[in-house]
Amino acid sequence: MSEIILETKDLTKHFGTFHAVDGLDLKVSKASIFGFLGPNGAGKSTTLRMILSLIKPSSGTIRIFGQDLRTHRPQILGRIGAIIEKPDFYPYLSGIENLRLLSRWYGLRPDARKIDEMLDRVGLSGRGRDLVSAYSHGMKQRLGLAQAMMHDPELYILDEPTTGLDPKGIIELRELILDLKRVYNKTVILSSHILSEIELIADDMVIIDQGKAMVQGPVKQLLSDQDLSVLVECDDTQKVKNILDTGYPGSSSRILSDQVIEIGMAHDKLPVLAQSLVSSGVLLYSMEYKRRLEDYFLKLTQRAGHADLDQN
Amino acid sequence: MLTWIRTELYKMTRRPRSYIGLGAIAALVLLIEFAMYVDGEDYLKFILQQLEAYFTIEGNVLNGYTVCFVILQTLILQMPLLVALITGDALSGEAALGTLRFMLATPVSRTGLVLAKYLAGSVYVAVLLLFLGVLALYGSMALFGTGDLIILKSESLIILKEADIHWRFLSAFMLAFVSLSVIAALSMMLSAFSNNSIGPIVLSMAIVIVFTIIGSLEFPLFDSIRPFLFTSYMTVWRDMFDDPLQTSGIIRSVLVLILHIVVFLSVAIFHLNKKDIQV
Amino acid sequence: MIRNFVCGIFLFVFLSDLSGQTADLSMEQVSREFKKLKTFTANIRMEFDIPYVRLEPVPGKLYFRQPDDFRIKTEGIAFLPKQNPFYSMGLLSDPNSFTLIDLGSAKIDGKDSRQIQMVPKSESDIVIGKVWIDPQRKRPLKFELTTRQNGTLDITYRYQPSNSGILPDEMVFGIDVGKFKMPKALTAELNSTAKPVKPQNGDTRGLITLKFSGVQTNLPLSDKVFK
């Protein structure tokens, strides 16, 4: 078992009679990417704010780096880099000035080379001298990442870091987060609405709803037991449907068009199906997963109406 | 702490709003000096007409010290606004901007943050007063020369000797600093309760205006209230121009003002430490 | 009865005329002495005892040239009576403007003096005046003037025993200074908890003392001095 870098026990926060977070137990392993999921109003933001000591828990404990947050707040926060909801900066200062200024709260006096390096890593080279008031939302998001990295923290808490990024930016961010883990051995808690991103890069995850953890564990393990939803592109969708109905009890199918059929079946049966379709003379053009996590998430929360998923 | 104060000061120097106060002071002081240069004799004649019914006033009445005193009387009542404009925004402005969330997620303690912001605010107050002092005192001295100073009070007047004035002005500026620091602390306290930038500034000014009006209305009913209004002690700078100096009264006023600073800051610190940052 | 009445009238007119002649003589003598001073300068120290004013003594220099050029140059702000301090002396030089009535002898600061009533013969700022003259030294000891514009003014002249001249060592002006009241808004005393330094107590008389030293007489003084 790898080292636990963050652990909450029975973490609870209520605002009056409303329980935003209700007895939440979390465990985040070192050098992992931890997906933090939940529908809007599930308590994600409140939890992350409690971890950053922005909100005081009503009860329960938070231990980070083996220390209690209540008693070791400055030491712990000095080792965390965070973007909460949206990165905000002083609009009357340039990107470089913002980074320099905000680093001082961590006791740093970064030189120009270090700042340039950070700006380069987040793709803001050459824009550092511009006033932040002239930045787009995506640029602010990138600057937020640079700011979070300035003091080389061990734990990153990134709340919706892809908001406002263009597709290229999302891909770059994904690579950056993976680098943090693989190259720099950092831990990342990643909260995102883009479930495909979490599915792609997270090692572990928790899904919370109404302040409670619905499931928690390694992503692969949690998703392996689930039926897959696969879009099959072929020359004869009716033939495929017949094969499924006769040879694969428990599977489901739905013809979407002359050439596309959506099928649902266990993950381990998929190679056998592919083989039998080919041997039956079906011309297969493609087989594509629909998002497993998305389905899993919706099933778990049972609240598709408020899941507010990003369909990218 | 020094780094945090420097950080706050750096932000102040880069905010256009910080220069509103300096610009307003420069404009008003220069305007008053110009007006006094052109119409000063008539102005003083009007002010002193009651006395001139009985006396011939000899000597250089329109001198730099007189002009500086007129400027102080005119401007010091308005300076709380200039101070609140900066300090009333200190915490709530960061909350509105979203940067407070960042700051409070760093190793900086909330108490340290309030103190750093207050001390930076105090530096700003000092800069405002220094600027005012240089322009109003030394500018007027350069323009009008020096001389004795007539201090008009509601029921008496004091003429201070030229050699006895300069130190009084310097002390008055220091007392004005303590008074305005109360405004800084008050607006900082209100700022801790708010998440928008304008509210604490407006509320600070409303409190100062209401207290000042209650304090200046000479109804017997308000006599018992007046000692409990901090604004009653904010004119302590003027007591430096009494002769003889009422030292115990000045010390008492300063202690009351300092007590207000401590109370306002304590409330700000207590509240911010309890506050959940949800914005 | 009629004889007694006529005798009485005659005696009154005779005595009045006699006292008027004595007063004229005294005034003329003082005036003559004063006119001998074509010019004079003196260092002065002005002291103030005015109910609502706190003003430390002010040094200065006084310049005078007959008949009524006068200037005080002060080292700082000073409050002076509205009249030229030697205005009273000037009155003596024109005794014909007044009907003078000798009111007999009186003591001023322990000194014997003749008390002379001055009643203007024509319309003037002075409603009525009174002067006390040292008959031996032929110099005034006190004036008391009631004026239309400035109320009652009294001027006491004090001389050192060694001073035999007409210029006093000290002049004390007693003047009506009224009451002083300024709106607090104008004095910016809003909210002040400070108590008045010097309560007025209803007293409206003020004293201004001019103390002379280093008197120099009959030196040429240019017009510039008096501008």
Image (cartoon, rainbow, N blue to C red):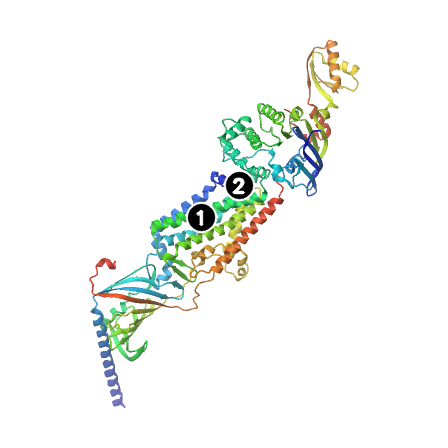
Residue A290, position as x, y percentages in the image: 69, 21
- Residue drawn where x is 22% and y is 77% of the image: C25
Q: Of the residues tagged 1 and 2, which is closer to the observer?
A: 2
> Could you tell which of marks 1 and 2 lies nearer the N-terminus?
2
Residue A126, position as x, y percentages in the image: 49, 26
On screen, residue A154 versus residue A124, left or right, reads right
Pick the front one: A46 or C59: C59
On screen, residue C44 versus residue A21, left or right, reads left
Question: Would you place residue C178 above or below residue B206 in this image?
Answer: below
On screen, residue A292 versus residue C126, left or right, reads right
Where does the N terminus of chain A fall, quadrant-wise? top right
Residue B129 is tagged as: 1
Pick the front one: B247 or C209: B247
Q: Looking at numbered disc 2 in the image, what kind of residue is underneath it?
A: Trp
Asked which secondary structure carries label 2, the reply is helix
The residue marked by circle 1 belongs to what chain?
A: B
Question: Would you place residue C186 above or below residue B107 in this image?
Answer: below
Which residue is identified by label 2? B4
Can residue A54 be spotted in the picture?
no
- Asked if marks 1 and 2 touch (Cβ < 8 Å), the reply is no
Mark pair 1, 2: CA separation: 23 Å
